[in-house]
Image (cartoon, coloured by chain):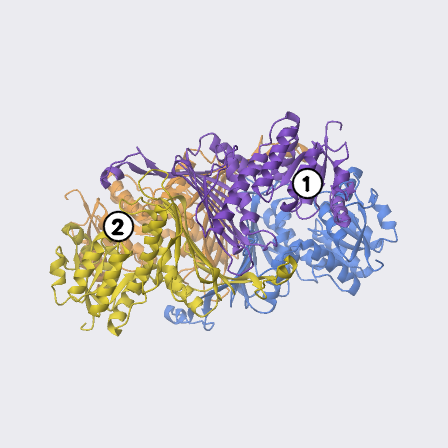
Chain colours: A yellow, B purple, C blue, D orange
Amino acid sequence: MTDRKNIAVIGAGYWGPNLARNFRNSNDWNLAAICDLDIDRARRVAESVGGAPIMTSLADVLSDPLIDAIAIATPAGTHHRIVMAALDAGKHVIVEKPLADSRAAGREMVSRAAERGLVLMADHTYCYTPAVLKIRELISEGFLGDILFVDSVRINLGLIQPDVDVFWDLAPHDLSIMDFVLPGGLDVTSVSAHGADPLQTGKACVGYLAMPLAGGAMAHVHVNWLSPTKIRQMVIGGTKRTLVWDDLNPQQRVSVYDRGVDIAEVSKATTTDARSAHISYRLGDTWAPALAEGEALAGVATEFAAAIREGRPARTDGEAGLRVLSVLEAANESLNGFGAPQQTTTRVAA
Amino acid sequence: MTDRKNIAVIGAGYWGPNLARNFRNSNDWNLAAICDLDIDRARRVAESVGGAPIMTSLADVLSDPLIDAIAIATPAGTHHRIVMAALDAGKHVIVEKPLADSRAAGREMVSRAAERGLVLMADHTYCYTPAVLKIRELISEGFLGDILFVDSVRINLGLIQPDVDVFWDLAPHDLSIMDFVLPGGLDVTSVSAHGADPLQTGKACVGYLAMPLAGGAMAHVHVNWLSPTKIRQMVIGGTKRTLVWDDLNPQQRVSVYDRGVDIAEVSKATTTDARSAHISYRLGDTWAPALAEGEALAGVATEFAAAIREGRPARTDGEAGLRVLSVLEAANESLNGFGAPQQTTTRVAA
Amino acid sequence: MTDRKNIAVIGAGYWGPNLARNFRNSNDWNLAAICDLDIDRARRVAESVGGAPIMTSLADVLSDPLIDAIAIATPAGTHHRIVMAALDAGKHVIVEKPLADSRAAGREMVSRAAERGLVLMADHTYCYTPAVLKIRELISEGFLGDILFVDSVRINLGLIQPDVDVFWDLAPHDLSIMDFVLPGGLDVTSVSAHGADPLQTGKACVGYLAMPLAGGAMAHVHVNWLSPTKIRQMVIGGTKRTLVWDDLNPQQRVSVYDRGVDIAEVSKATTTDARSAHISYRLGDTWAPALAEGEALAGVATEFAAAIREGRPARTDGEAGLRVLSVLEAANESLNGFGAPQQTTTRVAA
Amino acid sequence: MTDRKNIAVIGAGYWGPNLARNFRNSNDWNLAAICDLDIDRARRVAESVGGAPIMTSLADVLSDPLIDAIAIATPAGTHHRIVMAALDAGKHVIVEKPLADSRAAGREMVSRAAERGLVLMADHTYCYTPAVLKIRELISEGFLGDILFVDSVRINLGLIQPDVDVFWDLAPHDLSIMDFVLPGGLDVTSVSAHGADPLQTGKACVGYLAMPLAGGAMAHVHVNWLSPTKIRQMVIGGTKRTLVWDDLNPQQRVSVYDRGVDIAEVSKATTTDARSAHISYRLGDTWAPALAEGEALAGVATEFAAAIREGRPARTDGEAGLRVLSVLEAANESLNGFGAPQQTTTRVAA
């Protein structure tokens, strides 16, 4: 098919096979190469998707004029180098989360892509699940009203990573989802991070992020590698309704509660009675929208192709990845300050 | 029965009827009076427990030489005045949580009780539930090993209180339970509090408390009045096992997971491989102890009587109440500092 | 209040105190007496509701001209005798489930009440819970469409009753609810009962009831005293929607699923393709109606008073109780026939 | 590898790809062919497993002397013909459930395999899940005591099959599992089947099977294509403990409850008091064994190879498949008799 773009997957480790399989199955893409320094690893991935060319040299991939785009699934510390080289070679790029291992590196990548007029997409996979797409739609339609709080919990008995702490390993999921569903994206000006390393592994294994939002709202993330039970739940409270996303309940992942507190009027009344007179409670119905099944990465592949074709930023573009990095980097600094709030900004101009 | 002590319940509001009923049904106590300024309220409570003398004057209660003890279920702001008067009148005292509305007030109460040789007990009711008693027992026997983290969530669509924020309303439960089950009690030196008041009610409705514990461990509390779903869950991670208490699952409130991360040796090795070589994962069985049914307040009544009889502090004594107040007051200060960690101490000498 | 009716509760065992408390708290009733052969038992119940006259002689109760109605909470074997005497004494009667211990006895009671022009109500308590009232309303409005199947499970570790088997102990709940919510009531012409008594207690401890309904539909009940876990769930499948009532999930007791199988046309086509061409699947939203909280027995008391006042049958009248007995008696006969289907009828004329 | 056996998969429809993938990944097998009349379908399956020879003629497969065994994943109506031909060609055979579409056909297959000295294995996949293997082990060790009842529920919104009813589609799972875990296998002498076809599809869509077991015990199966919620749960009650297998709860699939009813002595005492004096209740702990993860079909492939190598019947052999067929066929007859119990036997000699 002549209108398919050619893509090479760089990195045949944990995530690469998933990318390879989805680009392989996509009508928008031709899987042109699997590239890994370890040729056996590359070969195994190629075989697992029914065959694909394998390569071991990134330079060879980038110098191939037939290749339109590359998908990077290597460790975060290598993203900057590979992305910059790929952009300089004129390739569109999609990068596994996190975008880079520092905000400065991420910012350079975003700038370079803009200069070259190329698409730089963050592979924020969760954003393309039917549940998150539905949440974004509901919020953007005003169904929840103004957002009052977002509380995300992502805990499990997880592998202690050799190179990153629990914040950098897990929180990009929560942060990228918040960025995707909140109107205007994740707009954070201060981050407090509290981490614990009770096993003395040299990095936080239990982590909490508190982020004030505009208008008195609050976003909070709890990530944990040491929990014996698995919880993946996000509660998004709004002035009209509150939504609970329980990703481990396939029969009812998203529930919208028409329950909450109504304040008739923002009152500065000083007496208790005056104030409480304006508060009432709604105990309405619960509604759980039907969600399509479907693999999120297929949506990622589709969106990447569409962004290139239409010459527009992807829905989870480099800027989105950069906002996530801004929070993570501020979290680092807060951790170094024993939890002191760290000023930051996720605004583009930063 | 001549060996029963006489007790008067002060306050016939929300909690008073529960106290009255349990002291009435106790073999250790004779319910000698229900006292409330509002005589109708006092009468209704008296009737609901099958009849009891009613009084409207605290002074009359305190001057009655037959009354041995008083149970206080009035707003926190009145505790100091009533407790001090009761102690000065030679009565043993049990006080609804929180012990007082400030640490200074609480400290005076504790000192006065010590001076008078009277029992001052904090009504930390949850500590006397079969679940919490079992958790305390398991931890004290070393079944969980050293404690790595404690994460407590207590969220619900709750009444916005006129006089207190969500921390002072709900967190005393979590803090008093932690104090009860942790070996050596709640030993906190720093508190970071993050609150949100997105409805502009004048007080935090969503709150988070992060408290580093000794040895790199961490305690964390999430309290929330705005959640449409109700969660009451505490996870206590230990070096040997991890315990999950789900108070809303009557069929399996307490689960102990023989799952976790084992570090063979606290290694300062700098290379990744060396470090990860020492990490292994256990994926063992889950065990849920059978728990007796039984109303916690009955255990409170029994413990109060036993402490008086045996001339010893109650298991949840004034000091325990004071430790909770120390955290709450530090939380206030942290809130005023936009989440900056606030030094404190829950040690007795403080 | 002069317009309150006077009621006596007969039987101070397990259920009597609940009846006494609810009639006591009702604006429609004056609790005129608690009657039990065991005067101490009667006294304890009277005290528990804040005082009420106690009596030990049924004859005295029935001869008291001020008493308008009686509520019977004695063993099922005594219902016939007490109800007949009460009706003959001109009293309205409400009887705990099951209405009687045989269909013949129940029929006599229903006839006698009709002759005397008195209300005979079955205390089918569950029918007055907010959940069941809502289910009845949804079905009667056609929200589920035609009913395809009803599957009810009521299992728990239960007390093995000395006098009745698990069918007579538990299934009256399921059957009375089905009778209440199904349009036209429980219309059963055949019952197959399968029971097991693996502990040789002399009666079935595990039981299943299969009852074909009109139009090819099916009702089924599973009752079990030997299950370590508690399940109380009813699924009601309809042509338009399917409802699941999970009585042990207080956060979402009733869920309505817009999911199901659509048959475009009732086809007798003999080929597979023709037939399957007419089948499609709906995977729509889930909706959980908000339910009021409220004790069901309060609704029972209100309905009993209203039926008397308005001179109409109660919503769960003697006929309803008789339909339940018809099924239970047919179940007995099926059990005796090793599960062979037993013809019966729940029609009034029977 | 010279010690691998060669296997051909017959049928490239729903289940064939799973068989192909697992035989492909097995160290015991060489995937020698995928055979389907539809060459495109065969090719797609071959590609999905990284390439394999494809064939369209069963005769060619069976005449290939290098092929040791065949795995059959074609419609049940074709099993008899293919299996007989394969056995006659000297091939070992594994057959997807149900073994055949009638008991007579199954019996011929079992006899022929015995005559030829070949392995005939039923692909009762569920039996090789970690959960079911653990259940079998616990029961065989006497951990549950004597079995009192087995209750299995398998309901979901399922595809209405063109050729089989809900019993033949789903109950083979429940029956084969019961056969696998019960000591001595499924020993049933009577089957009552109740089915409903409320959508007039021409076959039962809702079904119940009641099967008395020896000693007053009972096995029961509920299968349903019309349920909007998915339940896959089996409760196995024993004299010592009761086990609940909830296959949709990955965090705790198998729970063993030390709860139940103890009968001190099998008493024929006629008075209520005497009898109830011998009943007591245990409310002990719950225990959930850790279960390995692992695809059941990998265990199927291993077991098939081991049975051939060791010249012994497979753990789920043709006899096991035949016992399942005996129940299904008796269920058919019971359905034709409107639920009348149908005598049968699952004993080998039958």
Pointer 1: residues within 10 angstroms few (<14), some, or many (20+)?
many
Provide residue C264's location: percent of width, then percent of height. 45, 73
Choose between C6 and C37: the one closer to the eye: C6
Locate residue C55: give its quadrant: top right
* Helix, strand or loop under label 2: helix
Q: State whether residue A188 appears in this view.
A: yes
Residue at 61% in and 52% down: B163
Q: State whether residue B252 appears in this view.
A: no
User: Is residue C91 rendered to the left or right of residue D22?
Assistant: right
Provide residue C324's location: percent of width, then percent of height. 66, 55
Provide residue D62's location: percent of width, then percent of height. 20, 53
Amino acid found under the numbered disc labelled 2: Asn
Dot 2 and dot 1 within a common chain: no
User: Is residue C9 rendered to the left or right of residue B257?
Assistant: right
Q: Which residue is mark 2?
A: D22
Residue at 48% in and 44% down: B234
If the image is split into quadrants, where does the N terminus of chain D sit?
A: top left
* Helix, strand or loop under label 1: helix
Amino acid found under the numbered disc labelled 1: Ile
Q: Which residue is mark 1?
A: B82
Cα separation between marks 2 and 1: 75 Å
User: Is residue B30 rendered to the left or right of residue A21?
Assistant: right
Choose between A108 and B143: the one closer to the eye: A108
- Chain at tag 2: D
